[in-house]
Each structure stands twice: as C-alpha cells, then as structure tokens.
Image (cartoon, rainbow, N blue to C red):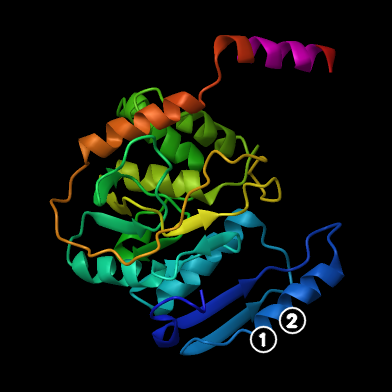
C-alpha cells in the first residue's frame, strides 16, 4: 500500500485484534511492532484491542467506528495485496459515483474469468476483497443472518441471490445463521442485495487475495482466485447504475466451473464415511 499512487495523501487506520484463546503472544507482538513502523501515509493511526473480537466483529466494529469519523472509507484486509494503482482507482470511482445512492461500494478485486470482462461493470450486491464504501452503503448492513434469510425467502429471492443456482450463497447464509461460520461478508452481501444496491468492479483486478494459501480463516489452499494485478491506471467513466448482464453471464460460467461434479460429490461422501 505504501507504493500506491495517493498513499501519501491517505489517512491510514490499522485495527490490531487481541490475542485469541490458544494464540501466540509473540506473533501478535511481532505484528504490532511491524504496524508501529509503518510510514508513507498522510497519517497512521493504530488501534490495538486488548480482547479478541474475532473475524466478523473485528470488521463490523472497525467499520462502525470508521463510519462515525468518515463519510466514505477504503477497507483492505491483512491478506490483500494491491496494485500500485489500487487507491487511485478506488478514489476516482468514489468521486465519480459519490451522488449515486444506489451504489453501495467499489470493489478492487475482479474474478479471473476465461473471457475478458468489461473495463468497469456493476453487479448487484457487494464483495469485500479490497472495497471502498460510503456510509449510505454500510447503513443497510443487517447483522442478524436469520432476519436476512427470512426476508430472502419471503420475497422469493433465494434463486437470484444464489446467482441463479451457480453460487451456494443461501447455504452460506444458513450456516452463518446457525453460527457454524463467522462471516461478515455474507451478511453485508445479503443486506446490499435486498436493498437493491450495486457495486462497481474493474475489468482487471487491483487486488490479489494472498490468504487463499490455506492460512486464511475461511480459505482453502487454492489458486482458483489468483489474478494478475493491474499494472496501469484505469480511467473511471460514468455508466448506468444497473447490473451488467455481459459480466454477470461470464461470472456465472466462472462460478459454475467451480461447482463439484456428481463424481466429486460421491467421492467426498465416501471419504467422509471411511475417514
């Protein structure tokens, strides 16, 4: 991030979670020592928590705190690697769509589809790998997964929410409602989807999630989501705030290719039985 165009004009706020049960105090101390040495920004504020908030609450409470201070923010996780032009794209897009109330956020990540995506495009809902958001977008966030699930079911929107059957998002929301996972992403996605809000994406990714190496809380060891970072800035032009069907269909194919085949499902069940 220090090498980003615009870093020296940016105020950086870093949230350091507290030690979790069974955690390594030395590792926590090493991270905090590293954060304390960060420079290259307009200002650096470090918030060190005494207690462990956990994944979801760390983000939710952090964003809540930020939204009390600022009208719009850029959120980057600790496993997000960015292009040098990430901040420039995010700030340009924030400025371009500042008055468009149906735009919840800007996402810096773009999925590695087989075919080239449009230079920029809108999709319903949100993503969280390198995201800029306004207070208006975060304002629709509903923390209760059961309420979100009920509303989706009552409105008959489960199929659409699941990308017309290509992504298991409803099952993820159900798992969150049962407290089997700890995801703020699925709840914000459902919240923005139900509010009819959109997110702007770049055709080439400005973010690489390096937590998919098996070290992330929810990530498995997989190169599925690896991308080539954009090596040039992107001019953000105005377009209608509506879902881009070309991009949507291409991403449907991407998610469809990730779904396990019948044979893989059978092998998984057999392995569970004999394992």
Identify the residue at image location x=42%, y=76%.
Answer: 68
Residue stretch rendered in magenta on the structure: 265-273
How many marks overall? 2
**Residue nearest the observer in this picture, 44 or 233:** 233
Q: From the image, tell me which residue sits under label 2.
A: 33
Q: Is residue 37 left or right of residue 75?
A: right
**Residue nearest the observer in this picture, 213 or 10:** 213
Identify the residue at image location x=53%, y=68%.
Answer: 62
Query: On screen, 165 above or below 177?
Result: above
Contact (Cβ within 8 Å) of mark 2 with mark 1:
yes
Identify the residue at image location x=49%, y=64%.
Answer: 82
Q: Is residue 108 left or right of residue 95?
A: right
Q: From the image, tell me which residue sits under label 1.
A: 37
In x, y percent, where is residue 218? 64, 44
Main SS of the magenta segment? helix
- What label does residue 179 carry, if any? none
Label 2 secondary element? helix
Q: Is residue 161 left or right of residue 36?
A: left
Q: Would residue 113 be seen by someone viewing this image from the given angle?
A: yes
| Residue 222 placement: quadrant | top right
In x, y percent, where is residue 121? 25, 48
Identify the residue at image location x=34%, y=24%.
Answer: 164
Query: On screen, 130 above or below 16?
Result: above
| Residue 82 highlighted magenta (yes or no) | no
Q: Most extreme residue toward the bottom, as rendered? A: 42
In x, y percent, where is residue 21? 83, 58
Query: On screen, 12 above or below 160?
Result: below
Label 1 secondary element? loop
């Amino acid at each position: 991030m220090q090498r980003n165009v615009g870093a020296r004009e940016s105020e950086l706020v870093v949230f350091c979670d507290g030690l979790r049960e069974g955690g390594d105090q030395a590792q926590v101390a090493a991270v905090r020592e590293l954060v304390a040495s960060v420079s290259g920004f307009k200002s650096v504020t470090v918030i060190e928590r005494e207690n462990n908030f956990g994944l979801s609450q760390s983000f939710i409470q952090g964003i809540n705190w930020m939204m009390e201070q600022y009208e719009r923010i850029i959120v980057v996780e600790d496993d997000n690697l960015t292009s040098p032009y990430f901040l420039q794209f995010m700030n340009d897009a924030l400025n371009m769509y500042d008055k468009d109330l149906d735009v919840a956020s800007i996402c810096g990540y773009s999925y590695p589809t087989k075919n080239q995506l449009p230079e920029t495009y809108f999709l319903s809902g949100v993503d969280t790998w390198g995201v800029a958001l306004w207070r208006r977008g975060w304002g629709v966030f509903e923390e209760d997964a059961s309420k979100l699930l009920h509303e989706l079911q009552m409105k008959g929107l489960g199929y659409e929410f699941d990308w017309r059957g290509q992504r298991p998002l409803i099952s993820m929301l159900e798992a969150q409602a049962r407290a089997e996972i700890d995801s703020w992403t699925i709840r914000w996605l459902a919240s923005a989807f139900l509010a009819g809000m959109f997110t702007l994406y770049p055709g080439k990714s400005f973010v690489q999630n390096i937590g998919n190496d098996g070290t992330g809380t929810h990530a498995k060891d997989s190169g599925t989501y690896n991308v080539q970072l954009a090596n040039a800035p992107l001019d953000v032009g105005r377009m209608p705030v509506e879902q881009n069907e070309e991009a949507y269909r291409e991403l449907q194919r991407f998610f469809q290719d990730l779904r396990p085949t019948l044979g893989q499902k059978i092998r998984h069940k057999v392995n569970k039985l004999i394992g």
